[in-house]
Image: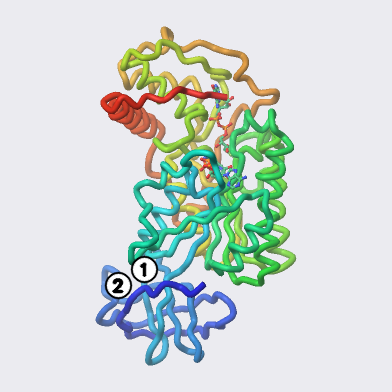
Amino acid sequence: MPKADQGCYLPVAGVLTATPQWHKRSTVHAKGKAGKGDVGGSDTGKWPRKCARVVSICRPAGHFLAWGGDRGQLLVWAGGASYCGAMPRALITGVTGQDGSYLATLLLEKGYEVHGLIRRASSFNTQRLDAIYRDPHESGVRFFMHYGDLSDSGSLVNLVRGLEPDEIYHLGAQSHVKVSFEIPEYTSDVTGMGTVRILEAIRASGVQTRFYQASSSEMFGLSVPPQDEATPFHPRSPYGVAKVFAHWMTINYRESYGLFASNGILFNHESPRRGETFVSRKITRAVARIKAGIQDTIYLGNLDSKRDWGYAPEYVEAMWLMLQHDTPEDFVIASGEAHSVREFALRAFEHAGLDFERHVKIDPSYYRPAEVDHLRGDPSKAFRVLGWKPRTRFDELIELMVDADIKLLDDELSGRLVSQDRDH
Ligand code: NAP
Ligand code: G4F
């Protein structure tokens, strides 16, 4: 599939000290003054830029477009007298999920052409993408969706081969821990084998791409906090076991075939787009409903487990940074703080002026056969190497989620659109 033309960038005066190899992504070092037409540029007007990544090289050799930048902005250099520009292309599995929808938005803002894998459902499953979806018949569209399934190798091979993406973000999974105890075989297939199917699609097609695997803090399970990249795994659920398998498969393809493949070991991250049956969103939705007088009680399971909670839009920035790094590596992405489910609920009720004790009841059916008691990540490596830092803290996260659910409910009520809760 030909790449969409990104338009014309004016060449920038500068020297590229490394010779990019057209068949491989390379790191180039740029030196010199920013020229006219520079869309990046530093505060001083010089190119301090350590490196940029070559994303597209046009033959004859020597003409290329490089981009990158330490603040995530698009920097463009033209090597040689002329160049052709092709925008970077990304494929996202799980694009309809919480993270996929934020990542698609981020990549579009960065100038990518974005392709998302969606699975067939009997009703629309693309609500989280409403803000970025445009009819593909219109001109200038840069976001596309393709049917496929992580259990279907053929669809994955065809997509990778047909699109030749520069970057693949593999976020698709059966991602609910409690549900994974009820459907362990399916979870292993989609969450574990799904990763192998994509890795094999990359290998079989020979497409030069960078691969991101959505690994999880759930892999640490019983390991004592704080958990970092060197902490041993001890998963406690079929989901956690499947993620450990996928994590090691990603490393294996990196070591065996030289694939640029990185694992992001992300701790819990939430947002107003979080699935309604994860505990954070279940609580903030219930708070909104209790406040509006259409619900009285919320039933929860284990209130004592502790999680390291962050804000999803910031966590997808880390995914992107990992694939812009010079080398494929694994990174823990976390806030570094842990709070109990009880603290989360107390703060959410308090923010809405409601009494936690009056409205929260325990239902043991939400307990898990094996629990992960305490997750707290140490994200020092991501701070140091990627320059990534979380910005939204625990209280702020809860407040923004409660406020968003109150607003959403107001909107639904005014349109008489209140839907039924279907919790697991
Ligand atoms: P999510 O909201 O549950 O989204 C999961 C995505 O996977 C959805 O788009 C879903 O499609 C898709 N999917 C599920 N089964 C599929 C299949 N058989 N074929 C194709 N697509 C399928 O998850 P998330 O919170 O965005 O998390 C993204 C990834 O990060 C997941 O791999 C998750 O395990 C991992 N992770 C999440 C966290 C976190 O705290 N959020 C932390 C660590 C790791 P539908 O919309 O059709 O269901
Ligand atoms: O919100 P949760 O379901 O998230 P959990 O199990 O930590 O998994 C999430 O984070 C992982 C990263 O660590 C991801 F890999 C995974 O995909 C997912 O996004 O549960 C959080 C805690 C658990 O200890 C659970 O037992 O909340 C406790 N909990 C208490 N009552 C409940 C409930 N969880 C849910 N879902 N529903 C309850 O009523």
Q: Which mark is residue 39?
A: 2
Q: Is mark 1 within 8 Å of ligand 1?
A: no
Image spot of residue 2 (x, y percent): 48, 75
Give how far apart the Cα atoms at labels 2 and 1 are. Answer: 7 Å
Image spot of residue 168 (x, y percent): 55, 60
User: Residue 414, relative to residue 159: is it above or below?
Assistant: above
| Label 1, residues with CA under 10 Å away: few <14, some 14-19, many ≥20 | some
Horizontally, is 31 left or right of 275 in the view? left
User: Residue 25, relative to residue 197: is it above or below?
Assistant: below
Q: Residue lying furthest top in this view?
A: 358
Going 66% across and 69% down the picture, which residue do you hit?
205
| Label 2, residues with CA under 10 Å away: few <14, some 14-19, many ≥20 | some
Going 62% across and 27% down the picture, which residue do you hit?
373
Amino acid type at mark 1: Leu
Residue nearest the observer in this picture, 286 or 262: 286
- If the picture is divided into quarters, which one holds ligand 2? top right
What residue is pinned by disc 1? 74
- Asked whether residue 51 appears in the rendered view, the answer is no
Q: Are marks 2 and 1 in contact (CB under 8 Å)?
A: yes
Instruction: Point out the tag, 2 or 1, that comes first from the N-terminus.
Output: 2
- Asked whether residue 204 appears in the rendered view, the answer is yes
Residue nearest the observer in this picture, 71 or 275: 275
Q: Which mark is residue 415?
A: none
Image spot of residue 257 (x, y percent): 71, 68
Horizontally, is 324 left or right of 226 in the view? left
Amino acid type at mark 2: Val
Image spot of residue 340 (x, y percent): 51, 24
Going 32% across and 28% down the picture, which residue do you hit?
412
* Image quadrant where residue 369 sits: top right
